[in-house]
Amino acid sequence: MDLFEYQAKELFAEYGVPVPKDKVANTADEARQIAAAYAAEGISKVVVKAQVKTGGRGKAGGVKLADSPDDTQEKAGKILGMDIKGHTVHRVLIAEATDIKSEYYLSFLLDRANRTFLSICSVEGGVEIEEVAHTNPDSIARIPISPLTGVDHAKALEIVRAGRIPAEAQEGAAILAERLWAMFVDEDATLTEVNPVVLTPDGKVLALDGKVTLDDNAGFRQDLAKFADLASTDPLEAKAKEKHLNYVKLDGEVGIIGNGAGLVMSTLDVVAYAGEEFGGIRPANFLDIGGGASAEVMANCLEIVLSDPAITTAFVNVFGGITACDAVANGIVSALALLAERGETVDRPIVVRLDGNKAAAGRQILHDAALAIVEQQDTMDGAARRAAELAGTGSARTPKGA
Amino acid sequence: MAIFLTERSRVLIQGITGGEGRKHGARMLAAGTKVVGGTNPKKAGQTVELNGTDVPVFGTVADTVAATGADVSVIFVPPAGAKAAVIEAIEAQIPLAIVITEGIPVHDTAEFWAYATERGNRTRIIGPNCPGLASPGKSNAGIIPADITPAGKIGLVSKSGTLTYQMMYELRDIGFSTAVGIGGDPIIGTTHIDCLQAFQDDPETQAIVMIGEIGGDAEERAAAYISENVTKPVVGYVAGFTAPEGKTMGHAGAIISGSAGTAQAKKEALEKVGVRVGKTPSETARLAREIILSS
């Protein structure tokens, strides 16, 4: 889970990572009030920063300096509602403007390839680290961090010295690094990035911007719900999450339900591949029913997928390993009955492919149920092709025989 | 022969008294696996009945190993206790630990991996978040169904469970030496490369099928390894061409970050070193069958 800058900075503050004074605003009026309160404390200049989970805010006009409460309100008004790379701005951060002497880069992250953690540090900050890697690779230090020994003050100094941070900022940067590491571990983060770390003319070291990613698997010991971003979550994804379903909304026409992450990913690809023949038909979602499929789970899955107005066909692709196909078939039959009971019209065709554990029994159940909208196919490729064909030929809303 | 798991393997189950441990313990026994014991500190000295067989329960992995000669541990312990369970297996120096558990925080996996490394990697770790491995006709350790395919000449290594089953099913006419599900987490113990190396050295394996998916660069590194070290034919499949950037697709490790970890990059890396990559699982199976039948 990626955090917004303001959430990252709240965590920074909790762990004693020094940050400029700031507060988040949902409206231009709130932005004005914050700036007015700061002005009363003698802080005249603020930065208005769009809160979006993507890079390049500055270039897109999402970061503006303001020198009065009126100016803050005006700038916030312009930034709120702005679209930055497909992300709508719902909040702005009002931060005390900081005088900057130098900008550096510091992060802790998961190093998948080496199966450990890594610190990246550079004397060149304020631009994307990928860009620095291109223009001045020698200025970037990569220091492996053992999960067993972590980062103490000596290690922190080693990191900032390796990143060639100048002597006047080393102590401050090392303290920042130590606290940032504590947060990385305690919060189950997979990324904590400060870019830039700034040195002010009066010798302070501050985290001016922050990017944090938390591990979704740590939900059993961390309060991840407090970081949930309902405003930007796709409504279908939110609904699926409530029902503990693993669903990702995509932009195509064929609704996908399958078992196992790899098989579902593969199903999306095979549908897109088959869809090339039918005018570029694409998968509409990722939905993994996981192990075992009770009628209720299948009903929830079909309900989510069919409630997407963009889909013209659904495709249920199951290879029964532990999951038994007769249970899946019963699930489909009772799901459709349940949806009918709820008064929902199910008129879009559902292509089903069942293989593996109890496939023959499952196929028989669907055959005997003789559901007008359910069509069975023998193979995954054949079923994907048929689903794409039904979605692409405009015959999608015409019921097909089972 | 087979890799990592043979008919001589003696399997213990960490978490044998839990629902998953019992269910899959029974399935493993039915598949002919020598399930010799299991652990639960609260039920040491008791037995657990699996499919009519009484299996002894011990307090620790070390006790189980001492009493039964177990050399493989299959771990079904829930995420909160998984790190301690793996570390216990490492301390007992069991040669192979298979971590089935899904949903382990990556900080915990990084920690037990560092712990294993510090102790000289005497315990091979497979997983976490994996279906385990099956050497058909010999032994089955994990949750891979035992009846999909007979023994044969193909070695399979895969990040995904159900895609593993699908591929085993498609190629059941040829059969498999060993199928290894290495898991879909960002940090895993045994990698594609470890399995490629073992299959290369296994006289029974004639061709290798390698299944990858988006996220990380394990497939790219496997491609580099293949060009230097693997002389047996390798056929590949990569899932996730249609996955959007920045979204986790089911597996914790299946995420494209920026331009890194795309299916296209993995496919190109594999094809560059002569690995034929199928567009669908079925096409991949056809490629593998062609290679086996023409050799």
Image (cartoon, rainbow, N blue to C red):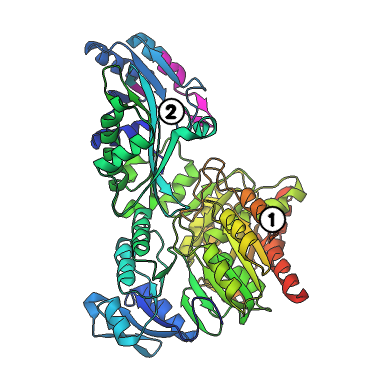
Q: Quadrant of residue B218?
A: bottom right
Q: Quadrant of residue A191?
A: top left
In the rendered image, is residue B3 in sight?
A: yes
What residue is shown with label 1? B271
Left or right: B141 in relation to A17: right
- The chain to which mark 2 is attached is A
Image coordinates of residue B224 in percent, x first then y, are 61, 56
Q: Determine which residue is flagged by label 2.
A: A124
- Whole-Å distance between the Cαs marked 2 and 1? 38 Å
The stretch of residues the image draws in magenta is: A75-94
**Front residue of A321 and B232:** B232
Q: Secondary structure beneath disc 1?
A: helix
Of B205 and B241, which appears nearest the observer?
B205
- Residue B234 spot, x, y in % from top left: 66, 66
Give the residue type at disc 2. Answer: Glu
Q: Compared with residue A88, is residue A227 higher up or lower down, i.e. above or below?
A: below
- At label 1, the amino acid type is Glu
Please state if A31 lies on the left or on the right of A61 as rendered: left
Label 1 CA crowd tier, 10 Å (few <14, some 14–19, many 20+): some
Name the mark on residue A277.
none
**What chain does mark 1 sit on?**
B
* Labels in figure, total: 2
